[in-house]
Amino acid sequence: EVIMFLRELIANYANLRIPILQRLSETITDIQQSRVLRGCLWLFGEYAEETELIESVVASLVAAMKPFPLVAEESKSEGKKSDAAKEESKKDGKKPTPVAAKVTTKTVVLADGTYATQNVYEKGASDETAAADGSKDGKKKSQLRSLVIGGDFLLSAMVGVSLTKLVLKKQGLAPGLKNEVLLVLVNMYKLVKGHACGGERCDSALRLTQCIRLMVGNCGSPLADSHLAASELMKAEWASTQGRTQLAKVLELASQNSEWALGTEAEVEEKSVGPDECIVFRQLRERKGGGAVGASMEDDDDFRVARGASIASQAAADGALFAERLAKVQQMTGLADPVYVEAFLQVHSFDLVLELLMINRTTETLQNVLVELSTQGDLKLVDRPTGVTLAPGQQVMVHASIKVASTETGIIFGYVTYEKKSAADKECTVLNELHVDILDYIERAWIGELAFRTMWSEFEWENKININTSISEVGAFLEHIMRNTNMSIVGRSYKKGSDKKDQKKGKLTAEDVQDMLKEAVGIKTLIETSSFVAVNLYAKSIFGEDALANISIEKLPDGKLTGSVRIRSRTQGIALSLGDRITIVQRGVQGGKQK
C-alpha cells in the first residue's frame, strides 16, 4: 500500500520525484518484500532522470547486490539433520550441511478476481549461516541479494531492466560503474540459467539477455545486424513515455472507481423535536366527537405518508401487496383430491411462518384432518399444525412455525391425513415439496477489495457454475445475476440511491444494479469495449455469513456467452445454495430477456 501511494505521488507531483527517489535509493537495502522491491525498481527506471540521482541509484543497487559472484546455494543432503547429528558435527568441529532456501509457489487472487502464481521465498539454514558469517565479517547482505539468489526470477529481471534503463539514460556514467552493472547482469543470467526452475528459455533469462545486449552495444562493441536491430527497437521502446501514459490511465481509473468508497452517500436529514412538544399517543386518544375522529384520521394520513403511500394510492398499494402475496402461494395438493391444501411461506428473519389453507372438496365430513410436516436442511419444526374437522366445502387456515439455523437450501415436505365415516382406516395425501428461497436470507452488503481478496484466499468452500444462458449481452447477464442474488459489486457502496421508503430491507432493485454499473467506470468500459469481463460480487446473509462470487464472462464470436461463476464461502451450505440459485435463474431466461 505504501509503494502504491508513493507511485501515485511521483506520477502526479513532479517536484516530489527527486527527494522521494533519493530516499528510496538510500533505503533499498532495508526493504524485505519482493513486490515492494519490484515497485521501487520500476519507479527508478521510469522516473529517475537527473545525473546525480541516476549515479546514486545505480551505485546503491550495485552495492546491494554485492559481494560477487552470485551463486545459488544448493543443498548437499535432503531433509534436516537430527539433534544428535548436529551435536556430533559440533564435537567433530565440522560445519552442519547447509539447507537450501525453499521457494513455494502459491496461487493468489488479483484485483480483477483472476488467478496468478506467486513465488514465496523462505530462508533456509544456509541463509542463516551466511548471514551469521556476514555479520562476523562485518558485512551485511541485503534482502535484495538474498531474494535474487533464492530464485526470485521476476525480481532478477526487474533489477536488470532498471539498471540497464538507468545506464542508457546517463551516457557519461563512469566506466567502472558500467562494468559493475554488466557484471551484475551476467551473474544474474548465469544464476537464472543454472537454476532448476529456470533455463535459457525462461522469461527472466530472455529479458536479461536483452539487457546484456544493450549494455554491450552501448559500450561500443560491434554487434550483428540482427542484434543491433533488436537493441535499437528496445531503446526506442524504453525511451518512449508509454509506461507513464499507462500509469496515468490506471490512476485515473482507480480514482473513479474509488469514489463510492470515499463517502459519497447522501446524508440523512435528522428531524429535531423541541423539548416542550407534546407526545400524542393515538391509541390513548379519545374518539368521541367529530374533532377527535378528524385528528385521528390526520395521524393515519401522516403514517401513510411516512410509508410512502397517499390516501389516493392506498387501494393500489393494497392491491399490489395482495398480488405479491398471491404470487408466493404454492399449491400443495391437486384440485381433485379430497383435501385441497395451499401454502404461503412468510419469512420473519430467523423464523418461518407457514400458513396452510385446507378445503374439504368432498360431500362428507372429514374428521381429524392433520398435516404432518418434515424438513430437510437446517430447518427445525417448532409448532406443528393442529388437527381439525372439516364439514363439506369448509375451509380452515392452520399455521406452523419453523426455525432457521443457517443459509442453506431447505425443503419442507409431508402429507395430510383424514378420516371418513364410510372408511375404516385413515386416508392420506402426499404434499408437494416446498422450497425455502435463499434470497430471503441474502442481503446486499459492502466490502473493500483488500478484504475481499483476504477472505477469498481464506475461505475453503468453492462452488463453480458454468454459464449456460440465452442472454447475448454481457451487461444484461451481469445485471440479471446481481438482481437475482442480491450481490453487489466489490468496492461499491450499496446505500447509494437506496433511500426509498417502500423498498425492502437488503433487497437489490434493478435501479440499484444499474446505478452500480454506471458508477463502476472500469467495468462499464470493459463491457462496452471488450468481449471479456471479470467482476467480483459480495453479499452477506442475515446469519452473518459472507458470500463471495467472481463472474468471468466471455462473449464468443457467434454471440453466445461463456464463462463461469465461482462462489466461495466459509461454510458449504451458502456456497451450494447460491450455486443452485444462479443455476436456476440463468436457465429461467428466454429469448435473451430476463423474466
Image (tube, rainbow, N blue to C red):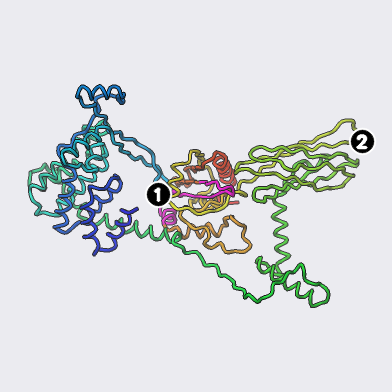
Against 393, is 496 above or below?
below
* Magenta residue span: 522-547
Q: Secondary structure at mark 1?
A: loop
Residue at the image point whose x is 68% and y is 44% from the top: 403
Q: Position of residue 29 (x, y in %)?
A: 22, 47
Circle 1 residues within 10 Å: few <14, some 14–19, many ≥20: some
Q: Secondary structure at mark 2?
A: loop
- State the image coordinates of residue 212 (x, y, percent, origin top left): 15, 42
Q: Earlier in the sequence, mark 1 or mark 2?
A: 1
Which residue does the image show at 79% across and 75% down from the upper left? 292
Residue under label 2:
421
93 drawn magenta: no
Q: Which residue is mark 1?
A: 111
Which of the pair 281/119 is nearer the observer?
281
The x, y position of residue 400, in whole percent, is: 75, 45
Mark 2: few, some, or many residues within 10 Å (few <14, many ≥20)? few
536 in magenta: yes
